[in-house]
Image (cartoon, rainbow, N blue to C red):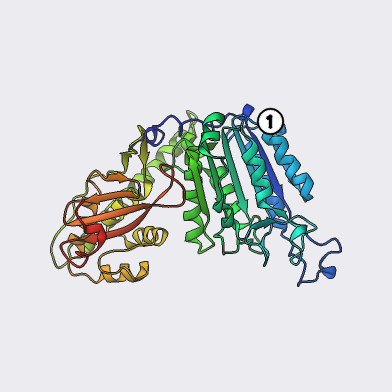
Amino acid sequence: MTRRSHTADATAGRLSGPSASRAVLIEAHAFTRGGAAARDRQRHLDDRPSVAAGCRRLAELFRDPEVWGLPEDHCAIVSQPTRDSMLEAVHRAAAEATDTLVVYYAGHGLLYPLSGDLHLAVPETTKDKSFTAVKYDDLREILLSATRVRRKVVILDCCFSGTALRGPLSADADAIRLADVEGTSVLAASHATRQALAPRGERYPAFTGELIALLEEGDPDAPELLTMADLYDRVDRALMRKNRPRPQQLNRDRGAHISIARNRASRQEPPETDETGSAAETRRLGGRRRTLAAATLVLAAIAGLTFWLLPDGKGLDCGKAHSTFDMGDGTQRHEVSIDEVHDAACEGDFRPMEVAMDRGGFDGTGLSAATPDKVIASWKKRTDRASFLHGLATLLEREPEVGQGGLTFSNGKQVATWARGAGTVPDSTYRWTGYFLCDGPDSGHPACDPP
């Protein structure tokens, strides 16, 4: 699979135009005028110094020509806002943008007892008075009225930010057609009932920090342009590896394909050497690397034989996962997680499969009530482990059936499923949700019913 195939469809392959786009980055990091000594913990919110640093760095990256290249006056920072200054900045940007509008907020998110709606904190906000905070719905209303803006993105790094996924950023279907809206995307740092994380001693909040790291370093396995789906997917993985609160995403229309950043890693070139001593040094280091690579291959071969020479005596000859498929609307989609599960099965590496299960709410192989770690523990005990994983890998080399509910790989005896995550067809992300042995323990599962 070449990198070009990741960006096969035209929408995913276009960076939002910097000249016609706007970004508003809002942060509230201090919440008591008198400092810590004056804080009433029953009423006042904790200060979050890392929020300010994260907002500034994100603005720098949006302005960086190697990332997005927004002109400075198209990327506004609103620090320590009042309710009016926050909403006015968003309103102004919405009136100016015609391509993409990005609104980022970092601070405290609150859910008050008499309201289930998300509120965004400003410096005057207290825990006991909802009117001291900004209703997220007020901000969303501005975005709904911005009918000239083709693409809208909201990024929230605050507690309970997943609550923002309950309402759309687009008006009804008729209004969308009239305004030629191409998509909306909401990226939230936490679940609707969970708190976000700003670890003490760290430079940035957890979610924003991973987003910054991705924009700074890029990802060699990602496409040349990072879509909202790419941003979510990779930040989610990074946070999950650190056992930190996981983000949520909701995409409408073609919101998953909105691209607001270039992938720095895809444009890195090998360093040049001069014609004298440095060239010789390069050759010497290259020789060492080749020797190390050869040793690594030998160890890998030994490890592979150790795994695959199991009691059933079968080895594994892997093909290529069918991870690029027709969405049914004339576009091609590449689903990275299919490659990950397929390759993990080929290598007998259960950890990536456990991660994929955890992200998808796994069900299947007679263990529908078990957690991913228990599923993996059961798989490791199988006497036919090699043939079991060989079956999974081979199954994923077939062409999937693409439907409203997701992807289905089936050969009549085995079924692997990827269900759609948060979002709407066709832009929702996919999550591995089951591997079923229909000629065995899962014969009664609905996934095994013939089409």
Name the spot of residue 183 as percent of width and height, x first: 52, 37
Give 282 or 203, whichever is nearer the viewer: 203
Question: Going by the image, does 88 lie left or right of 449?
Answer: right
Task: Note whether residue 264 is visible.
Answer: yes
> Which residue is depicted at the point 72% across and 32% down?
73
**Quarter-of-image position of residue 71:** top right
Relative height, residue 84 to residue 109 (above, below): above
Relative height, residue 417 to residue 306 (above, below): above
> Which residue is depicted at the point 13% across and 65% down?
312
> Which residue is depicted at the point 54% across and 62% down?
245
Q: Residue furthest right?
A: 34
Instruction: Return the residue at label 1.
Output: 96
Amino acid type, callout 1: Glu
Name the spot of residue 25 as percent of width and height, x first: 68, 44
Quadrant occupied by the N terminus: top left
Q: Residue furthest left?
A: 313
